Amino acid sequence: MLPLRFSFRTRLVFWYTLLLTVTVLILGVVIVTVSRASILNTIDVVLEKTSTAVVNVIRLTPPTADDAAAVVLSLISDAPLHTPDTSVQIWQTWDDNGTITPRLLEASEKLTSPAMALDPANLTTTVPHSASLIFNGDRLRVLSIPLLDGTKSFGVIQMATSISHFEQMQQSLPPIITLAAVIAIMISLVMSIALAERVIRPIETITQTASHIVNAHDLSVRLPEDMADEELGRLIRVFNHMMERLEHVFNVQQEFIGDISHEMRTPLTTILGHLEIMQRYGVDGESLQSVHQAAERLSRTVNELLLLARADSGAVVVEMAPLDFDVLILEVYEQALHLTKNRTLKIILSPIDAVRVQGNRERLRQLLMNLITNAIKFTPDHGSIRLSLKAEANQAVLEVTDTGIGISEKDQARIYDRFFQADSSRAHRSENDGAGLGLSIAKWVVDIHHGQIVVHSVVGQGTTFRVTLPALPLSANGVRLPELEDHWPTKSRTSRDKDTR
């Protein structure tokens, strides 16, 4: 047999009502117990004050040698015995042949049975004692106070007052509290149902919205953020933010699939086309070169995708070490000259400051090459590309500036997206062109080096990429540390122009 399963709304109402019921019951028990103890304590205080007046009129008469059983207690006044609403008995005790025998000395006239002790069990008490008893059908509160001479008891005063009205009141409290509890529970049940409905409504809306998204495949659906306050309001805002992220990721995924399909289809088409030509007409050098170039482009795209995928999963281990960033820039500069050997471009090397950074040489080389090849791609012939490196406030500041076609403000927000290529129709195409992953990789390299990369571009005038990395300290005079001099190239670090025409 399957266990019963209740809805969240039912469980919420049940637990809320149960909690209130337990709270009311505990509160009722506390009220009855505390009120009874408080009232009895007040009665005991009144009886104790009255007993003081009785004690003040009692005198002790020592026994004589002739009569050891003589009365040893006496009263000088019986006025305190006639206090309204209070009954008093004075009992004397003495040691007669080793037996303690209580004897009534005085009693209030209002007692119907004066010779009967109000509290027989405490006639020989040596400490004050209070008790609630039934005496002649009446409920009494009795206070027994011993009369001591040192440690020996010579008598006891028992004072009592009726607590029948108090007991009746106490007996009426539980039904009143029970009735109030039932009314409170009924009201709370109605309120908890309404409260549960208000709490569940936004959750049901979220559930329906999520179901609609699943069934309709519509990631643009959002919840109104004014439908709930506080915690649920924050939940709705988080849900909407999550949907924005999901929609963005889905759109990027769709674009990614389309872009990668296009990027891979182009070299594959080239390879298949030339293979078909070679199969039909035989192998020739031009076809082999085209196949080789297409295969290199395809391999480069796959390697870049694998790198970014591993970077996303955190599987890329990048070892950092101190290195001379300026030396690395000079090395990349030589490679850039080789890349523009068939172009009429100027590669200008501005003054390069001696700067050391904590980084990975190959990843930083990849960063520089991606920025330079991007500048070469989007700079028309007869343009120029400038490299510079400055040390500013413990920072290494690299700038790659070109006089190319520029990037629009709308495209600047997406230049680091994978496969995004701004205005590629106006770019200079070559067999070395990438698949639009270079700036994505550059951004990743900057991030793992705890740096920043920003772009400033004006359409038709050019673009500047500014990379800022934390710099390591040099020597006190601001020049290269001595142990690094052997690695410094003999080429000048002053402004350097080279026209590759």
Image: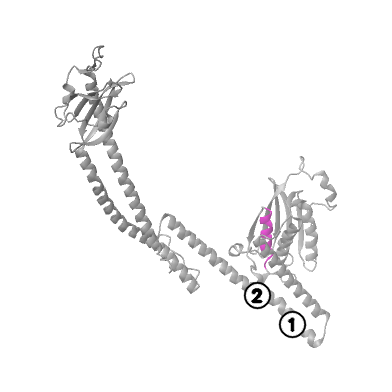
Residue at the (44%, 66%) spot, across then down: 207
Question: Are the residues at dot 1 and dot 2 in contact (C-beta closer than 8 Å)?
Answer: no
Q: Which residues are magenta?
A: 436-449
Q: Position of residue 499 (x, y in %)?
A: 80, 62
The quadrant holding residue 82 is top left
How far apart marks 1 and 2 lie (CA) works out to 17 Å
For badge 2, the amino acid type reads: Ser
Picture layout, residue 95 above or below residue 227: above
Pair 1/2: label in front? 2
Q: What residue is at 37 percent from the left and 59 percent from the top?
A: 196
Give the prevailing secondary structure in the magenta stretch.
Answer: helix
Q: Quadrant of residue 333?
A: bottom right
The residue type indicated by label 1 comes to: Gly
Location of the N terminus by quadrant is bottom left
Q: Nearer the viewer, residue 382 or 188?
A: 188
Residue 242 position, x and y percent, is: 52, 62
* Viewer-proximal residue among 276 and 497: 276
Side (left or right) of 265 relative to 207? right
Q: Is residue 250 visible?
A: yes
Which residue is identified by label 2? 261
Secondary structure under tag 1 reads helix
> Is 297 rendered above or below residue 416?
below
Q: Is residue 302 above or below residue 287?
A: above
